[in-house]
Image (cartoon, coloured by chain):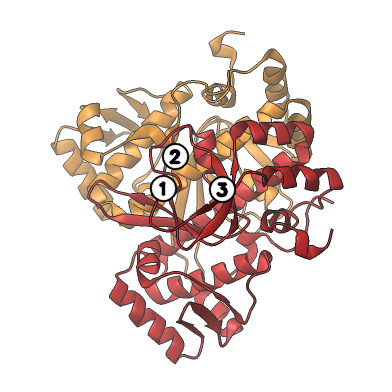
Chain colours: A red, B orange
Amino acid sequence: MTAIDLSPLTRKLSAFVALSAEELAVLDRLHQRRRRFVPGRDLVQQGQSKQAAYILASGWVCSYKIQRDGTRQIVDFQIPGDFLGLRGLLLRTSDHSFEPVNEIQAAEVLASDLLEAFTSTPRLATAVLWAASRDEALVVEHLVGVGRRDADARMAHFLLEMGARLALVGIGSKEGYDCPLTQYHLADALGLSAIHVNRVLRLLRERGLVTFRNGRVTFHDHQGLVDFAEFDPAYLDQSGPLLK
Amino acid sequence: MTAIDLSPLTRKLSAFVALSAEELAVLDRLHQRRRRFVPGRDLVQQGQSKQAAYILASGWVCSYKIQRDGTRQIVDFQIPGDFLGLRGLLLRTSDHSFEPVNEIQAAEVLASDLLEAFTSTPRLATAVLWAASRDEALVVEHLVGVGRRDADARMAHFLLEMGARLALVGIGSKEGYDCPLTQYHLADALGLSAIHVNRVLRLLRERGLVTFRNGRVTFHDHQGLVDFAEFDPAYLDQSGPLLK
C-alpha cells in the first residue's frame, strides 16, 4: 500500500501507532459506508440521540454549541481524518452540533462497528483513544486561548494549529494551506466580532507574518508567527509513532 | 459485591456499562498501586513525558495550564473515580499539570496496564473511551462558559456540575456537597478575579439559591439554580447504563 492510498484517518493514527496489515484492513472496513453532505444542514444536532458517528474523508466541518440566547461558540473545526460525533455515540446524546463548512465526504460508523473493531484489534482501541485524547487537548488549548490569550495571539495560534493538523494528513505545509472558513467562523471560534477578526488579520499581514485571503492561508514567516503566538505544538503529539 | 465495596471509578463506569464479574476484577487490579499525595506539589507536570496516569480514589485534584506570562487557566477539577493524566499517557508529553487540592489517594496506571486490560476485556476500552469523552464534554462546557456565559450563570453552572459529578460517585446530592476549593481555584477556573468570585457568590446566596461557606456547598433551591444557570446535565451522560 503506498502513502497515496492511505485514508487521512490512517495517516493520522500512524502518528501514534505503527499499524499492522490487519489493523489497516479493519480501518479500511470502517470507511465502507461513505456519504456526501453539503453545507447548510447539521450532520449531527445538539441533543440528538442514537445518531451515528462519522470519519471525515474530505472537506471541513465545524462543531459548535448554541446557547439559549442564540449566541454560538464554535468548539473546533474537523478536517479529513477526524472523527465527528464520537462523543455523541458514546454519550447517548450529542453535546453539540456538527455542520459541514464546505462539501464533505464522510464514512458513517456505528457503535457496533467500533466495538467489533476493538475486539478484533485491541491496539486500535488505544489508537482511537489517542485520537480522542488529542481532540480533547485541542479543546483545552481553545479554552486557554479564549480565557487567557489576547486576540492577536489567539488568531496566530489558531492559524498555526490548523496548519500543523492539516500537514499531518498531507494537505498543508509551513508554506500554507487552503482554508474554506469565513470571518464569521473565525469570530465564533475565537470569541471575537467579525470586525475584530478583520483588524487582527490585517495586523498579522502588515507585520509580514501571515495572510488569509481568497480561501488560502499563506505563512510569510512561519517561525516568526510561532514566536508571536508562543505556539508549542507538543499538545498535537504528531512527531512519529509511540507504539511500534 | 455490595455498593459500598465499589471503587468510585467502578461506580462511574457503571453509568455507561453494566460490568461483568470479569470486568470488575480487571478494574480492581488497576487499583493495585495506590499512593498518597499532598497539596503543594504537582502530580504530573505540563511538558513532562513518560509519566504514569492515575485513577483518583479519594480527594480532589486541579488540572491547569500555565501561560508563559504566568497566568493560570484551570481546565477542570478531578474527583474520585476520575482519571488523571490519561491524555498525557497517550500523548507522550502531558499538555497540562495536575496538583492535589487536598490530600488524595490515587492508583498509578501504566500504559501497559491499560493495553492489557483492553485486550482481556474489550468492553472496558469502550467504557474508558466513554469516560474520556465525558471529560472532553466537560472541557467543552467550560469553553462555552468562559466564552459565552456571564459570571453569575458561569458560577451557578459550575457548582451544579460539580454536584452532579459528585452525586454519581456517591459523595454529593441535591442538598449539597463538601468542597475543598478556595476562591482562587474558582477564579482561575472561571476566568474571574477573586473579588469578583466573592461578589458572585454573595449574589447567589442573597437570591436564596446556593451558599458556599466553610468547605461546604449547600443548595437552598436546586431547581431554581438549574433554571438560573440554564443547566442541562445531558452532557454528563449519567442516567444509567447504555451497554447492558
Q: Which mark is residue B182?
A: none
**Looking at the picture, which amino acid does disc 2 mark?**
Ser
Q: Is residue A69 left or right of residue B40?
A: left
Considering the image in quadrants, where does the N terminus of chain A appear?
A: bottom right
Query: Do labels 1 and 2 touch, CB within 8 Å?
Result: yes
Judge left or right: residue B185 versus residue A37.
left
Counting every numbered tag in the picture gives 3
Q: Quadrant of residue A75?
A: bottom left
Label 1 in the same subunit as label 2 = yes
Query: Marks 1/3: CA distance?
Result: 30 Å
Q: Is residue B196 left or right of residue B19?
A: left
Residue linked to disc 2? A94
Q: Which residue is mark 1?
A: A97
In contact (CB < 8 Å): disc 1 and disc 3: no
Q: Residue at x 42, y 41 (%)?
A: A95
Disc 3 to disc 2, C-alpha distance: 28 Å
Residue for badge 3? B98
Q: Chain of mark 3?
A: B
Tell me, yes or no, whether dots 1 and 3 are on the same chain.
no
Please name the residue shown 67% across and 54% down the image.
A9
